[in-house]
Amino acid sequence: MNKESSSKGLLCNVRRYWPLYLMSIPGIVFFVIFKFIPMGGTVIAFQEYSVFKGILQSQWVGFKNFEILFRSSDFYRIFTNTLILGFLKITIMFAVPIILALLLNEIRRAMLKKTIQTALYIPHFLSWVIIAGITFEIFSLSGIYNTIRDWFGLQPVLLMQQESSFRWIYVFTGIWRDAGWGTIVYLAAISSIDAQIYEAAVIDGASRLKQMVYITFPLLLPTILVLFLLEVGNFMELGFDHVYTLLTPMTYSVGDIIDTYVYRTGIQEARYSFATAVGLFQAVIGFILVMIFNKLSNKVSGEGLW
Amino acid sequence: MVSLSFGEKVMHTIIIIFLIIVGAIAVAPLISVIAVSFSSRLPVELNEVTLWPKGFTLDSWNYILSRSDLWRSFAVTVCATLTGTALSLLITALTAYPLTKPEFKIRSILMVAIVITMVFKAPLIPYFLTVKAVGLYNNPLVLFVPHILTAFNLIIMRTFFLQFPVELEEAAVVEGAGYFRRLFSLVLPLSKAVLATLGLFYGVTIWNQFQHPLLFVTDPDWFPLQLKIRQYITSDNELPIVGSIAELNYNSRTLRSVTIAFSIIPIIMVYPYLQKYFVKGALLGSVKG
């Protein structure tokens, strides 16, 4: 089929089914403006972009912005911080919902189970501003944490301003807000396990603990694996809101990640090209991780993004 | 049910107690903040308030609730959430529906384009400059327009539409109903479950968003609630304590607690009624995992 007839075919198609095209216009416009134009705008990473000159007039500088990035002392810090928080996210923060789901599954009293689930789900619907606000209250000088220390005769400490505690606070607030919510998928997977398997195990004399270890957990493994790979694909997405709302200038050395660094250099200092280069670097690593995830996911479960 | 051995009963009890403690820890900070917000200054300064108000007073609440800027932010957030949710559902449905029709010729190109947006994410700065260039900087529309469509929700809605049998629309076609009529009077009324779930997720996103307003709204008149709260709790100057401290029944800590409680209480109140939709939504998302 040559090009002319195919474009003619499209024109006919549009004329005949115009309502379908009309319907999709807002969505297409949305994706073009908010997704594709910014993607194209990424070229300013290779420019000395100036708002007044625009993309067409700005000077091209090749990889200069990347050189500045890789040579700067900031780079080592933000990259390590991103990797460490990402690692904590895919290990500890990933494991907690699985353990919680296995334990919740042991509760047979429906009312009690539901009440505990509700309590665990609620924090998920609070914004990070609120979660961070409460966390700062808890660890303030007159907060509950220092009150308890006081009962044991310990000196008050300001954990939120301490470098050594920032990462743990990131982990715990993450667990507090999202671990309960994360159990939903696992609980659904557990409830779809064939009851006959348990019945057979009981006849063979398997205890509840053994059922958990030898039946529930192994049958949950495919779900765990898929979600784990998904998390690996999202490795670089640590949550701007989460980190930014917990960060204080005293904790930059351990808590400043690529996202917050891009915000500071790009938005606050208006170094557009440089911050775009930083963002592009992150996007490339993120993309590689997604590709790896997709390949592995296709191999493991036969299902990937595409 | 087979009776449990003694050891298993002990295990079972330990698990239950452990989970009750975990559940209590999850909500205790919220209750504590609410308790402080209703307490008098003195017990709060002496660290006597834990989970129940001491020296019950509404003074801190009166102070905060008399702030017109807070109410303005609240109104901005409510309007953005309602408008944004309605608009999101409309646009998502309008975009998803043609994607289920084989006769829609650009369907596969669009699907590829949508998946591309999920894989390649533009860096923040070009996104910021684009949104600014289309005139959304310091424009209240920025609170919901950038959220009205996500590739993920679009795919979920499309998948939902695809579950309907083709015969469903055939009768309507015979009667001469066009695509718009079929979508609005046939398909959407049967899609209430997915609309409720996606609507709640869009709504929560807009209500809780922080990064977008932080980037695009610098005019305090258009601060949504989250920015306003952030401003209150991070800067003492925002909540000046007027008058002699000794006479007042509140301090900066009770005021911060009121600010936080102000935004928690509505969520805690509506949450139990909506939980079942949320849970459904969490599973919808995981199907495509």
Image (cartoon, rainbow, N blue to C red):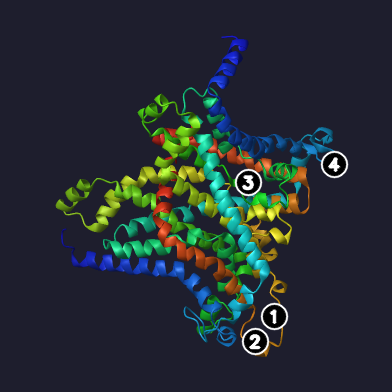
Which image quadrant: the C terminus of chain B?
top left
Point out residue B127 in the picture as x, y percentages from the top left corner: 69, 43
Report helix, strand or loop for mark 1: loop
Cβ–Cβ under 8 Å for marks 1 and 3: no
**Does mark 4 fall on the same chain as mark 2?**
no
Same chain for mark 4 and mark 1? The answer is no
The amino acid on which the numbered mark 1 sits, given as a three-letter code, is: Ile
- How busy is the neighbourhood of tag 4: few (under 14 within 10 Å), some, or many (20 plus)? few
- Distance from Cα at disc 1 to Cα at disc 3: 38 Å
Residue contact between numbered discs 2 and 1, judged by CB atoms under 8 Å? yes
| Residue carrying label 4 | A52
| Mark seen at residue B241 | 1
Q: Which residue is mark 2?
A: B248
Amino acid at dot 3 = Val
> In the rendering, at what x and y percent does residue A114 appear?
34, 61
Q: Determine the CA span between mark 2 and mark 4.
A: 53 Å
> Which residue lies under the disc numbered 3?
B145
**Tag 3 or tag 1, which sits nearer the N-term?**
3
Q: In percent of the image, x 60 and y 79: which residue is there?
A: B60
Tell me the residue at 45%/48% (across/down): B197
Chain bearing mark 2? B
Residue A92: image x %, image y %?
Answer: 47, 56
Contact between labelled residues 3 and 4, with CB atoms less than 8 Å apart: no
- Dividing the picture into quadrants, the one containing residue B233 is bottom right
Q: Nearer the viewer, mark 4 or mark 3?
A: 3
